Amino acid sequence: MAVLDKQVEEALKEKAESLKDTKNETGSDGSDATEAKDAKEEDDEEDSKFPKDLEIEFGPQKDLAFARRAYRIANVPKKRYIAILSQTADGSFALVGKGSSGVEIDIFAAQDYPSDKFDATSISASTVVAFDVSTDRDYVSLIRSDGSIQVVPNKISSIMSACRDPDVGVTNADEIALSVWPALEYKQMYNDAWRMLRDYFYDVEMHQVDWQAIHERYLPLVERCRKREDLDDILAQMAAELSALHVFVYGGEYNSPFSDDSKLTDAHTPASLGATLQRNIEWKGYVVKEIALRDPDFNLLEDQSVYSPLSDQALRPSGQKGLQALRPS
């Protein structure tokens, strides 16, 4: 029994020394294991079939600028506010609200810290029909009902001046020009459509389709697009690679050469004789080889049957027995 206890004691001692050596090799904090885990994650990321998207910077993690100002919001009076028009660094901000006379700009100028009070001012802006802030948030634009556009710095004092005086910061809208590169727009729309399918398709394996290869396959065709309809065809072919239901391509800005009236859509559709024609050099004309028959379940226009202009049903009412073309003298 004593011999067995001694053997067990020696085995436990060897196990403890082995664990101690392992701990010394990997570090007390298990750094080697952590590094191995990080390396594995990097390898998995590199092996991913999808390209890595751009990292979005949300600013310093310990930035409490908003927290220092947010406590003031509790003192904003109740009202039907539409949007936040501006917010400055000192905690002041301007809200767009609905008043009895229409649109109103409510200015809340923050008092000195640590006060949580505002100096509130409401300015009637009934002729303001639209407003926006520039992408760099340095300027504010106000559009009046008469079409004039005011652009002023994104400051409370500037906004108050623009609201009170419609002539402040007025820009010459007649000289505003917009540069549009359809080729670049088509490429961006193609990339966005491809990315949307990648990110929101129900099957993460994309039906075993190499989705990155699909993007590269159709991209050269996008560079050859000359109109919006061409891009739709490419998007439909790209989406069809998934062989999935409920994947559609619709909408977009299409040219209407004659009218923007949706009721006149058929007027923009090229006509057809509904026949197969063959060129005859000897007769210096064409021979009708085949005339399409009407499908009883389709070919309806306003509940009326539509026939080929060359069919008997179309020619018989006129009493004409054949086609007649008059050559100009």
Image (cartoon, rainbow, N blue to C red):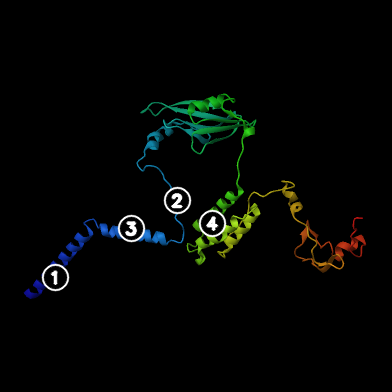
Pick whichever, 165 or 278, lies toward us.
Answer: 278
Q: Which mark is residue 38?
A: 3
Q: Which mark is residue 194?
A: 4
**First along the sequence among labels 4 and 2:** 2
- Circle 2 is placed at which residue position? 54
Residue 1 shows up from this direction: no
Q: What crowding class fits label 2: few (fewer than 14 Cα within 10 Å), some (14-19), or many (20 or more)?
A: few
The answer to whether 1 appears left or right of 197 in the picture is left
* Type of amino acid under label 3: Asp
The residue positioned 64% from the left and 33% from the top of the image is 174
Q: Which mark is residue 11?
A: 1
Pointer 4 and pointer 3: residues touching (CB < 8 Å)? no
Q: CA distance from mark 1 to mark 2?
A: 54 Å
In which image quadrant can residue 168 be found? top right
The residue positioned 52% from the left and 28% from the top of the image is 159
**First along the sequence among labels 1 and 2:** 1
Q: Secondary structure at mark 2?
A: loop
Q: CA distance from mark 4 to mark 3?
A: 30 Å
